[in-house]
Amino acid sequence: MQLRYRVLVILLFSITSLVCAQQKKLPNIVILATGGTIAGAAESGTSAGYTSGQVGVQTMIDAVPGIKDIANVTGEQIANVGSQDMSIKIWLDLAHKINELLATDAVDGIVITHGTDTQEETAYFLNLVVKSDKPVVTTGSMRPSTAVSAEGPLNLYNAVAVAANKKAKGRGVMIVMNDQIHSPQAATKTNTTSVQTFLSPMQGMLGAVLYGQLEFYRMPHNIHTTKSEFSVKGVKELPRVDVIFGAADMNPDLIDLSVKAGAKGIVIAGVGNGNMNAASLEACKKAIDKGIVVVRSTRVPTGYVLRNGEVNDDKYGTIASDELNAQKSRVLLMLALMKKHTAAEIQEIFYNY
Ligand code: GLU
């Protein structure tokens, strides 16, 4: 072989090996799909009406140009529902699956596609029961996959970029939507239709991700994942906890009914600083005397619910939710109720998580 051909062959061989090595080095990310608007389809690109959970995980992955350049991506369909139909069973399936996958060296991170309606609850639940410091990211979209300017593909690309990034390790479960990275403990859905819906009003976002380039601003400050005391290993169901919405002149009957129906815990989305009228407070006291745990959260979008604010928690035996909104207080209380705790211990749990 002539020298120049030999050089060419060696060059080609080196380039191919380099490309292969490069490919091998990409992190392995598993996408667990659960449905939501990101997998939704409408009759036209501008139709307001659509059905969540129509598109399968592989179709979603195929719709994201460049995703295979940032990670070795595989998909698995866990469910395909609008997240208004997210269930405790699916939460447990997800937790078991994630713990199993992340325990192996073959998986470096997880992305969960999910509707936005209850995404903060799923992400917060997983933040408390995933036993790994590898990145776990939830994402979704506000516009269905068939919409003009559907934002799902970019959200999915960014979510994979975060899950694949070493800097994301040890930050717990994260919500990645609209270029922002949030901790589920701090984040909440704030707008019914806008693509800018998740905010962390009290703490601010964890970081930002722009076309896969990311920057973290802070660590989550509450206990999560590997440090969390909660485990759902072998667990098939969670104790029933109901949320009751506070309002002027609210009727205490719903509290009594919840007790009768077998709730082990009740979260009041109270007015203001977790307040409720006198009749409701008395109904809560009756429930507490029967061994039901009552948490005072709030219907107000921002701020803390302070222990012994206008309600004397020491006297009534109620728990103040601190910074958790009602829907996430329910998640934490369900997990706390898996073990016997005193009211003081549950209060401590609400301060720590
Ligand atoms: N109901 C839908 C869901 O949560 C709408 C929200 C969304 O995914 O954006 O699945």
Image: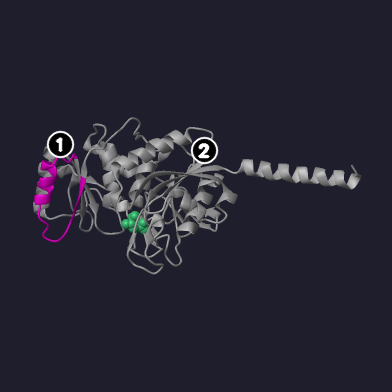
Which residue is at the front of the view, 267 or 109? 109
In the depicted structure, whether residue 247 falls above or below residue 32: below
Tell me the crowding category of disc 1: few under 14, some 14 to 19, or many 20 or more residues within 10 angstroms, Cα based: few
Residue 296, position in %: x, y? Answer: 22, 49
Q: Is residue 76 left or right of residue 86?
A: right
Q: List the residue tagged with mark 1.
A: 291
How many numbered discs sit on the rendered protein?
A: 2
- Asked whether the beta carbons under mark 1 and mark 2 sit within 8 Å of each other, the answer is no
Q: Is residue 302 left or right of residue 11?
A: left
Which residue is at the far top? 234
Which residue is at the front of the view, 271 or 225? 225
Q: Is mark 1 within 8 Å of ligand 1?
A: no
The C terminus - image quarter: top left
- Residue in view at x 67 percent, y 42 percent: 20
- Looking at the rendering, the stretch of residues picked out in magenta corresponds to 242-264
The residue tagged with tag 2: helix, strand or loop? loop
User: Can residue 260 be found in the magenta stretch?
Assistant: yes
Q: For the residue marked with disc 2, what is the amino acid?
A: Val
Q: For the residue marked with disc 1, what is the amino acid?
A: Gly
Residue 78, position in %: x, y? Answer: 38, 43
Which circle, 1 or 2, is nearer the viewer?
2
Residue 105, position in %: x, y? Answer: 53, 33
Q: List the residue tagged with mark 2.
A: 107
The residue tagged with tag 1: helix, strand or loop? loop
Residue 319 falls in image quadrant: top left
